[in-house]
Structure formats: structure tokens, C-alpha cells
Image: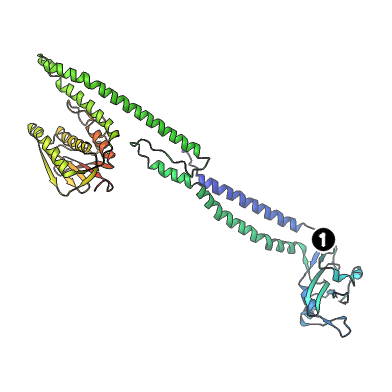
Amino acid sequence: MKDKTVSLKRTLITLPLFFQLTVLLVFFVALMSYAVRLDSGGSYTDESITPVIARAIVRMADGNLGIRITPELKKLISETPTLWFVVEDEVGRYAEFGKVPAEYASLRGMLHKLSYAQIRDRSSPYRLSAVIRQEQSQIGVLTILGHGKLNQVSLILLFASSAFLLPIFVVFTLISLLLTPFLVRRALSGVSAIAIQAQQIDITQRGSRLGEQQVPVEILPFVRAVNGALQRFDDSYDSQKRFITSAAHELRTPIAILRAKLECSDNQASREFILDVDRLANIAEQLLDLRRLDMVNSREVIYLTELALDVAADIAPLLVELGCSVELIISTHCSIRGDSGAIERVITNLIQNAVQHGGRHVIIRIIENGFEVDDDGPGIPKEERSRVFEPFHRLKPRNTGSGLGLNLVQEIVRKHQGDVSIHTSLRGGAIFRVAFLKEVCI
């Protein structure tokens, strides 16, 4: 059964959005339902009749109010045969039209003191349903009590509620959809930065730590736990390095004493062990070389052409003695910053490795951003090319070599911000190519 990966961003965005929109929808539906059920009464009088009535009112010569049958009012009368209304000015003078119910008789003369009301009748034909509104007209402010076209209360409230609440619902929805993802992404930006830092950690470099800046408080314990693990890894690595260094130092003296005794021995069988003792001495020295890499801080200018020429001159007599040769080809000039002793060790180890694996003619070639060592040996199978840099790994069992030479090469090159790769030579052998970053090259 496969483990399902959970997205933190999706959880923080989708679930809050779902609950927010659900709450808004429930609130909207509940408020609409409440609006529809506000009252069990009858119908509303349409408020659009009051402006029509106000425009039909005129003032008579004696100061009283009169009604002029305008086309608008005529149309209203034809649409609503039961139309009636009472109009009153600011001093209590009034005019009325139609059959005004006796229940409203007491409002005559008092109507101008009211500003707005909706009155509903509980039973059909809803003759008492009326609206009270103040309207501005050509003769001043008029207060109108009227009964006209009826609307169902549910439709009116539903429309009014929708017109008021729907824009709010839409605005809140848009804010949630746009603002929530932005806030979540901003809050988790520190986590993304930490992930990038973690990807860039080089296991070969000590002291790498994840930054705690802009990290959410909830993620901080995890970051500190990772930093703690890195610290323990560094401590363990340093402890192993100290042990290897101490062991190598301690081995040098007894190995030297043993070699001296073997050289002085008259027993030929004993003297045959000198090569094995030399091999032990070489292993101890290369272990110390690995340890010295951590203390390499030199950033001197290294002219690879001159350095390779010096190495070839120093090692040539030994190669001639073994029946081999070395050639230097300078296709370009390349200079880097680093430790010349360490880079010299790289070139020497690569030449020795080529000879030990059957190379009879070794070529040192200076390239644009580094150098390469080309041999005419049997070559290295592709499946073995990544493993030859492992400590003590050998392609074939041999009585010579320590198994640390190529590992030392790789460590030195990495220390100088470079990369060592293996390719197939045109002569059938192997090419070890050392390339440095542009920041290192001069």
C-alpha cells in the first residue's frame, strides 16, 4: 500500500476555504429563510405608487390639496381598481382618493408626523394593506398613505435580502479565494527557503546548517532537530577523522622501525616483506593526506602548465624505469586558485594510477578549465566508474597500491570546487578529467 503524500499548502488553503464558504452559505441561506418567515401576515403594498401619487397632487387656490389625474395616475388606477390613498402636507391639510378604510380615519391630520411604514392585512382581500412614505413634490413635502398593487411578502423580502446579502457573499468569497492562498504561501515561504538550503547541503562540507530566519514557529523544532542531526554528524565525522589521524601517526613509527629491521635482515625471505611494509607506509601517508585536506586554506595562484611540467619531470625517471613514458600536451593555458601541493598530489596520483592499471604511455593534457590524464591501458568499465573513487575499492586484486589514491584525488578536487570524471580514451584507455568551476579559474 503506497503512502499518500499530504500537501501542507493544500491543507491550509483548501480546508479553511471550504469551511469559510460553507459558513457563508449556511449563514446566507439561514438569513434568507428567516427573512421569508419574518411574519405570517399577508401582502405588501408596492411602494412605487407613492412617487406617482406625489406628482399628481396640486395646491388649490384656497391652499388645500387637490388631485390631478395624470397619465401615470390614470394607468395606476386602471392597473389597480382597489387603489386608494390619503395625501397630507406639512400643516395637516389633506386630500384623498378612492375608498379609504374607516380604520385609517384617525390618521387624518396626523399623517404628516409619520415618515415611513408598511402595514399588512392578515386576511384576504388585504384591503388594509398600505404603505406610508414621505415624498418631495413641487408643492413641498407630502406624506402619503396608500393602498395599491400588492406583492407577496416572501418575494419582496427574498429580493431585498438577495440584493443586500448576495454582493457581500460574493465579496467574501473572492477575498477568501484570493487572500487565503497568498497568506498561506507567504507564511510558508520560509519553509520553501529551508528546503532549498537543505538541497544545497554538501555532505563533504562540515558546518552546514539550516537557517532559522523566517521559519514558522511550528516548523522551527523540526529545523532545529535537523541542525542537531547535522551537528552530531559533524561531531562523529571529526571523531572518526581524529581516530584515523591518530592511528596513522601511531603506525608510522612501528612501520619505519619494521622496514629498517627488514632492510638490515640477512634473511632473503624477510626482505621480501619490504614491499608490503612500503604499502602499509603509503596507506598511512595517504590517510594523513586526507586529514590534511581539512586544513588546506591556501588560495595561491597555480599555473597548471608549470605544475604539470614539474610533476612530469619528477616522475619521468620512475616511469622510464618501469618501461613507461609521460607526455605533456598544452592546448591552452589555465590558472586556478588553491593549494599547489594538493593539486600536485592529484596529478601524481592520476599518473601512478594509470601506470598501475597497465598504461604504458600517459598524456597530461591542459584544457580550458582544468586538465586531464589520458592513458592507453585497458580502460575502466562504465559500471565501475563511480565506485573507483570509493576508499579501498579495487578493480582487480593487486599487491601494490593502497586503494586510497583516487579517493584522495576526488576529495582534493572537491575541496577546490571542481569535479573529476572518467571517460574513454581514443586509445582504448581511460581519461580522468579534472574540471574546476569558473569561480576558481583565473
Residue appearing at x 84%, y 82% in the figure = 59
Give the residue type at disc 1. Gly
Residue 163 percent across, percent down from the top left: 68, 63
- Which residue sits at x=58%, y=57%? 174
Against 267, is 40 above or below? below
Q: Nearer the viewer, residue 94 or 97?
A: 94
- Disc count in the image? 1
Q: Residues within 10 Å of mark 1 (few under 14, many from 20)?
A: some
Question: Residue 273 occupies which quadrant of the picture?
Answer: top left
The residue shown at (15%, 41%) is 308
Decide if residue 6 is in sight here: yes
56 shown above or below 175? below
- Dividing the picture into quadrants, the one containing residue 258 is top left
Q: Is residue 132 left or right of residue 216?
A: right
**Front position in the image: 108 or 140:** 140
The residue identified by callout 1 is 41
Residue 233: give x, y in percent of width and height.
Answer: 39, 31
**Taking 180 as reference, is 307 above or below it?**
above
Work out whether residue 93 or residue 215 is closer to the camera in this orientation and state it: 215
Where residue 349 appears, as percent x and y from the top left, is 19, 34
Furthest residue toward bottom: 61
Q: Is residue 392 visible?
A: no
Location of residue 272 with respect to 151 vertically, above or below = above
Task: Tell me where residue 77 appears, x and y as whole percent.
Answer: 81, 78
Tag 1 secondary structure: loop
